[in-house]
Image (spheres, grey):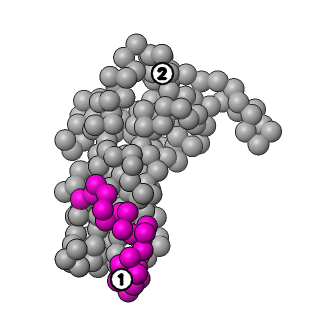
Amino acid sequence: MEQILEKLFDSVPKARILRIFMQNPDQSFTFDMIVGKSNVKSAQTRKEINKLLKVGIIFEKKASIKKMKTIVYTANQDFEIFQELRNLIIKSSVASKKNLLQRLKKLGRIRLAMIAGTLINNDRGRTDLLLVADDITKGKLERFLSELESEVGKQVHYTLMTKDEFTYRTNMYDRFLRDILESLHEKLINRLNI
């Protein structure tokens, strides 16, 4: 299912922008928020927003943000095929595990990488990504998460632990960690033999 939406719509920017609205149908976004969340350049974002407005998939309205009037964009939940389009986008938004694994390996020496929650279309997860590693730099991780969020169309909640912290919390029967390990998840990297 890798990049079905991009192939169907023949546009990575349009697919990313649609994901933002369909994954968050009750939220409104400013233009700058859409640019930031989608990782799409301003000119291309403006072009795609105008197309979506014209078709009626989204609408714009004026809102007050920090006492300033601004235009925000929201999914049109009354759009004729809104639910069908949303279902298609949600099903196609699961990150490709093969692609995700390759990108994770570039972050550093990861001992455990588990995906859950949004990354496997399960809204009940306590975290979307659990990483156990000792040498991941903050900058690399932030770039990785930014790109992943733009592909998924939603914020990715992650948990990063060192091997020592993971071992300690496992031995202490840490409730948060137990909830993650006992809930629906998939292990992409498992050098800890969990």
- 73 and 43: which is toward the camera: 73
Give me the residue at 78% from left, 37% from top: 68
- 133 and 180: which is toward the camera: 180
Q: Is residue 171 magenta?
A: yes
Q: Residue 109 sits in which quadrant?
A: bottom left
Specify whether 191 is left or right of 40. Answer: left
Identified by mark 2, the residue type is: Gln
Q: Is residue 40 above or below residue 57?
A: below
Q: Position of residue 28 (x, y in %)?
A: 58, 34
Q: Is residue 68 above or below residue 171?
A: above
Give me the residue at 55% from left, 22% from top: 59
| Residue 187 in sight from this viewpoint | yes
Quadrant the N terminus occupies: top left
Label 1 Cα neighbours within 10 Å, binned few <14 / some 14-19 / many ≥20: few
Quadrant the C terminus occupies: bottom left
Specify whether 11 is left or right of 68. Answer: left
